[in-house]
Amino acid sequence: MESFFRTHKYLVEHLDDVIPRLLMTQIDWTQRLIGIKGTRGVGKTTFLLQYAKEFFDVEKKDCLYINLNQFYFTVRTITSFAKEFVENGGKTLLLDQVYKYPEWSKELQECYEQFPQLKIVFAGSTMMKLEEDEVLAPIVDVYNLRGFSFREFLNILFHKDFPAYTLEDIIANHRKISEDILAQIKPLEHLWAYMHHGYYPFFLEKRNFSENLLKTVNMMLEVDVLYIRQIELTYLPKLRKLLYLLSLSAPGKPNISQLSIDCEISRATVTNYMEYLRSARLINMLYKEGEEFPKKPDLVYMHNTNLMFPLKMTPIEDQALRETFFYNQLHHYDSKLKRGGKNGMFIVEHNNNRYKFKIEGQKSRGKNKTELIYAVGNLETGENNVIPLWLFGFLY
């Protein structure tokens, strides 16, 4: 136990000063069992350590971070470890990479029932279906840690404290909000940099971003998809090929029959693998209104713009970047998005409101339709129903 406390102290004390994530203020920390899902590379470990640093005194030893990658937990159960921790005055246990431990779901339930004075916060992959887990679903509060929004990216780079805005705020007050932000910084000048490398926190590291991202993507496929969904390793090349082929046409309408031929797997397997890639947050799938999985999506997008560069390795159209950016930022705002009928059009449902957006590179002349909201790429400020695209990066 003391060895774990020493590691915990070292990690907390050597944690770099970074801007807190918005999720930190959105979690109900009074709950006893909290699950934080996030794709590989978005900063789940850092998030847990930030929580420990902000809310606990490391000398009191009432909070402990442990990584279940530790070989120690091949012979020690979570339940017995938690029992010892509680008996020594422990109150909050932070468990990282929980899915690496067999029977983790069952033992978390045991801890919840046996130690009512203990709070457990655990982090794991987006591939974990916590909401469908019969054992944990009734007792766990689940949250999603996203990659950096454009707002968070700017706050980190320029040591700012820009707040997040609701979609309704942006639609109603976008000109005033834009002017307030523009008084401090020129967001449009930094939008391409965010699209290229701003989504994943490791852009702050002194390593080649593209190579690091490719390594992360491969780990997502090898561990988060194959391991958690229990797919045989022999299928990994087919899964990698499918992702690559989808990236070449994204955003585009998938030809399931051709993908089946190219990847040498059945049409049903193509559809299932696409859903796995979506769950791993490598792609997004856009459907027409009234349709959803397991039907074929109308369009496939990469999950975020950063993924488009190292996977495709060819020039990327500006419109593809604009649409992918919009989809990603709105999708992470927990909005429901559907295809709006024409290219570059999205139907967004949020808080019982329904909006129709058109994504454009520059403001249209003489075609402004009042039933549409235009998200325009080259604008600093807008007017009426014409809104700068970059402002949708301030939703979270």
Image (cartoon, helix red, strand yellow):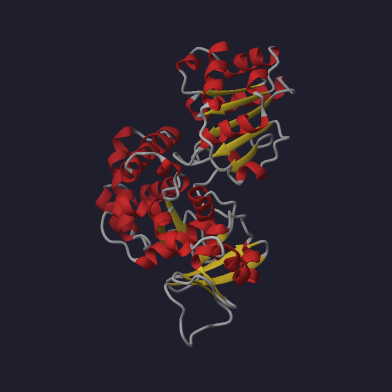
Image height of 104 relative to 285, above or below: above
Residue 170 in view, yes or no: yes
**Residue found at x 53% / y 56%:** 331
Give percent across and percent down for residue 279. Answer: 47, 46
Is residue 298 visible in the rendered image? The answer is no
Label total for image: 0
In the picture, measured across the screen, residue 278 lies left or right of residue 57, that is left
Image height check: is 102 above or below 342? above
* Viewer-nearest residue: 37 or 270: 37
The x, y position of residue 278, in whole percent, is 45, 49
Residue drawn at (50%, 55%) of the image? 150
Q: Is residue 379 or residue 220 the one in the foreground?
A: 379
Q: Position of residue 114 (x, y in %)?
A: 71, 19
Give the image quarter of residue 132: top right
Which residue is rendered at x = 26% and y = 58% of the image? 314
Q: Position of residue 384 (x, y in %)?
A: 60, 78
User: Is 103 placed left or right of 311 in the picture?
Assistant: right
Question: 104 or 203, which lies in front?
Answer: 203
Q: Residue at x 48, y 49 (%)?
A: 157
- Residue occupying the far front of the picture: 183
Answer above or below: position of 274 versus 298. Answer: above
Looking at the figure, which quarter contains the N terminus? top right
